[in-house]
């Protein structure tokens, strides 16, 4: 029954694999991006009225450069000459009339001469006024050039503003499309991650279902084999189980024994460390008590043999002192044999300045 249930669950998972999905947010952002791309983008900039006016102003300004004065082309000067000519004529006639009056109505011969002199005197002022009219014309020309230059600046500023507005429009279009694309990309990436998460969860569930199905089939096969085994096979399995239990008991006893050995070794290690400290402590006292440090070698070996023989120091303490004072253990053993052989004294005695 367990195998049937596991197979059913496995088949349901196999037939129900998740498919990639698009969220509502992604669909909406994709539609918004498509709509934004359909908007008419600004065409190539061709200039406006300000650009046309700027070209006209530049041409007028360039054409107005340079000043060449000609009295014949100066209407003000020509009007001035005409007025002075009329005044000169009037002066000439007035002079002729005055001369006649003075001559009692006769036309004297000098009347024409005097009137011509008056006329010529008037006309000389016309020539003298040319520099003034030239300066006035130059000032008017400079004013026109300044006015044209100002117009160039004004139209140039306006053309730059018009082009700036065009670039702003292009930039706004681009920024808006970038915003729509970023929003779509974010929503799409979220969908991809969620689909990947669903696929991962599905894969884990499918793998688990497959493993459970295989385990159920294995258990079912083992159960079948066990139920079809003969009594001899069962007895053999029972014997193997007994042997396994015995092996387990042996390994348990061995582990306990190893644990006791390890504990004993640790205890011995602690004891050895304690003995070492004790050897160091008592050995140092013995060295100081008999001034062994720096003493004669024969004296040192003799004192170590005496101290060990009489129980002042232990074997471990004697060995510690010998190692500290760089004394050969064989020399100590030789002294100890002599001391024991002579019943607790050296045969010849010690002549190092100290008693035995």
Image: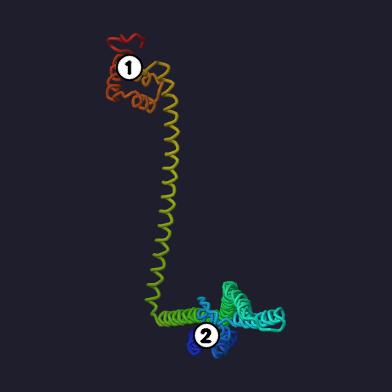
Q: Nearer the viewer, residue 97 or 77?
A: 97
Q: Nearer the viewer, residue 325 or 120?
A: 120
Q: Which quadrant: the C terminus?
A: top left
Sort mark 1 into few (<14), some (14-19) or many (20+) by Cα contacts within 10 Å: many
Residue 228 relative to residue 184: left or right: left
For the question of whether residue 283 can be seen, the reply is yes
Which quadrant of the figure has residue 182? Answer: bottom right
Query: Which disc, if any, is residue 302?
Result: 1
Residue 94, given in percent of the width and then of the height, sits at: 69, 81
Q: Is residue 304 above or below residue 154?
A: above
Image spot of residue 233 (x, y percent):
37, 76
User: Which numbered marker is on residue 326?
Assistant: none
Q: Which element type, helix, strand or loop, lies under badge 2?
A: loop
Q: Specify the quadrant of the image occupied by residue 239.
A: bottom left
Q: Would residue 190 be seen by someone viewing this image from the given angle?
A: no
Task: Judge depth for marks 2 and 1 and give the one in front.
Answer: 2
Residue at the spot of label 2: 45
x%, y% of residue 53? 57, 84
Q: Residue at x 40, y 75 (%)?
A: 234
C-alpha gap between disc 2 and disc 1: 119 Å
């Amino acid at each position: 029954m367990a195998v049937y249930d596991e197979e059913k669950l496995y088949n349901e998972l196999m037939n129900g694999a998740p498919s990639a999905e698009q969220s509502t947010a992604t669909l909406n952002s994709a539609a918004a991006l498509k709509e934004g791309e359909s908007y008419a983008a600004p065409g190539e900039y061709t200039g406006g009225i300000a650009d046309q006016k700027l070209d006209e102003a530049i041409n007028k300004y360039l054409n107005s450069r340079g000043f060449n004065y000609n009295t014949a082309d100066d209407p003000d000067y020509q009007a001035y000459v005409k007025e002075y000519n009329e005044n000169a004529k009037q002066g000439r006639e007035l002079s002729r009339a005055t001369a006649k009056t003075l001559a009692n109505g006769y036309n004297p011969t000098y009347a024409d001469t005097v009137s011509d002199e008056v006329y010529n005197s008037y006309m000389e002022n016309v020539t003298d006024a040319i520099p003034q009219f030239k300066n006035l014309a130059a000032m008017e020309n400079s004013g026109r050039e300044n006015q044209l230059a100002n117009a160039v600046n004004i139209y140039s500023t306006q053309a730059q503003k018009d082009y700036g507005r065009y670039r702003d429009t292009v930039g706004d279009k681009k920024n808006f499309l970038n915003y729509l694309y970023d929003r779509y990309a974010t929503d799409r990436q979220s969908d991809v991650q969620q689909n990947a998460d669903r696929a991962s969860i599905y894969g884990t569930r499918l793998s688990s279902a497959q493993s459970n199905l295989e385990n159920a089939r294995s258990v079912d096969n083992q159960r079948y084999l066990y139920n079809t085994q003969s009594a001899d096979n069962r007895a053999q399995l029972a014997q193997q189980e007994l042997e396994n239990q015995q092996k387990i008991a042996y390994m348990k006893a061995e582990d306990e024994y190893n644990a006791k050995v390890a504990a004993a070794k640790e205890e011995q290690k602690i004891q050895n460390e304690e003995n070492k400290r004790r050897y160091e402590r008592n050995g140092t006292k013995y060295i100081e008590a008999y001034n062994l440090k720096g003493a004669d070698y024969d004296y040192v070996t003799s004192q170590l043999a005496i101290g060990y023989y009489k129980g002042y120091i232990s074997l471990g303490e004697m060995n510690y002192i010998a190692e500290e004072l760089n004394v050969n253990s064989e020399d100590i053993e030789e002294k100890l044999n002599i001391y024991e052989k002579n019943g607790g004294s050296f045969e010849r005695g010690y002549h190092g300045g100290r008693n035995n």
